[in-house]
Amino acid sequence: MIERALVCIQKEENMNIGEQLQLRRKELNMTQEEVAKKLFISRQAISNWETGKSYPDIENIIALSTIYEISLDNLLKGDKNVMIELRKNRVYQYVYTTLAILSVASAGICLLIDLLVSGRLSWSLIVTSSLIYVSAAGITLYKSTERKLLKAFISLSLLLIPLLASIQYSLYYSQMNQTHWLIDRGIPLAIIWLVIIWFVIVTATICKLNNFLAFSLVAFLSMFGSYLTGLLTGIYSNLNDYFDHFLSNGLASLIVGLICLMVGSSSFIRERKTTE
């Protein structure tokens, strides 16, 4: 009996954090769905932790130790991978915090200079809105536990109109005779590129395309988007104008698209063969 108990203890010590979480959850007769509700995350995230596909962050580890009534030392003991992951997350947290402080400071300096020089807020709104726009994507990527890119694109799409509105406001008060820029160009251009981006996201999700194939689709569609952008901005008047400037506007996208297509196709074929 004593030897069997010692063997069980040794097995538990050699378990990684995912195996420990799964074992403890089953000992408490809890489902993944129940744990997910307590942590306000999806059931898939719990499954990924237990199978070792991903690791919980330090906040969720502390919460799990409380839910499962297990000490942090026992939970983390023997799992070097999770300790490495926690160190990485700590470094990322410092980087994001530094970037956030720099963004706020930059926005404040721009607003102050704009007020002192112009007597009102004009161009600084574009800078501030752009910083908020980029920061929203960064925060989404940092805080999300799954589908990070999808959630980042959603946040960028929702904040695009406020960004364009700040540009319209700045153009109007800068006396650049662009009172209808938002309606004439801003919103149409936003719609064009949002349609292209979301078409790629939906296609890649449904067809399960790898990153190279998805990026090749972006590159090819960007040529069409560039042409429509040129028409709206007055750079092109017809398709011949676009091809006259193809070397500077479309050739790079074509080359990148073809390279990504070849690499992505070979990778896609290999993955299909391994699954068959």
Image (cartoon, rainbow, N blue to C red):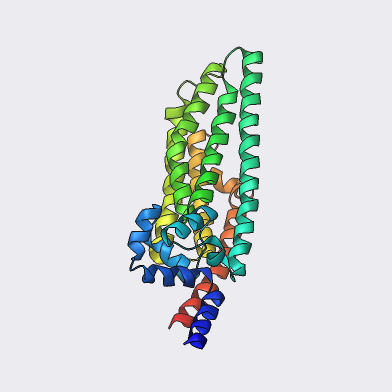
| Quarter of the rendering occupied by the C terminus | bottom left
Observer able to see residue 146 = no
Residue 27 location, quadrant: bottom left
Residue that appears at 36% across and 67% down: 28
Q: Nearer the viewer, residue 186 or 229?
A: 186
Q: Nearer the viewer, residue 176 or 58?
A: 58
Q: Position of residue 242 (x, y in %)?
A: 55, 45
With respect to residue 130, does 209 lie above or below? Answer: below
Say how many tags the image has.
0
Q: Position of residue 26 (x, y in %)?
A: 37, 71
Residue that appears at 45% across and 67% down: 21
Residue that appears at 55% across and 40% down: 135
Q: Nearer the viewer, residue 207 or 48?
A: 48
Answer with left or right where residue 220 lies relative to residue 102.
Answer: left
Which residue is at the far top?
119
Q: Position of residue 79 (x, y in %)?
A: 58, 70
Q: Position of residue 270 (x, y in %)?
A: 52, 78
Q: Nearer the viewer, residue 172 or 40?
A: 40
Observer able to see residue 249 = yes
With respect to residue 118, does 223 lie above or below? Answer: below
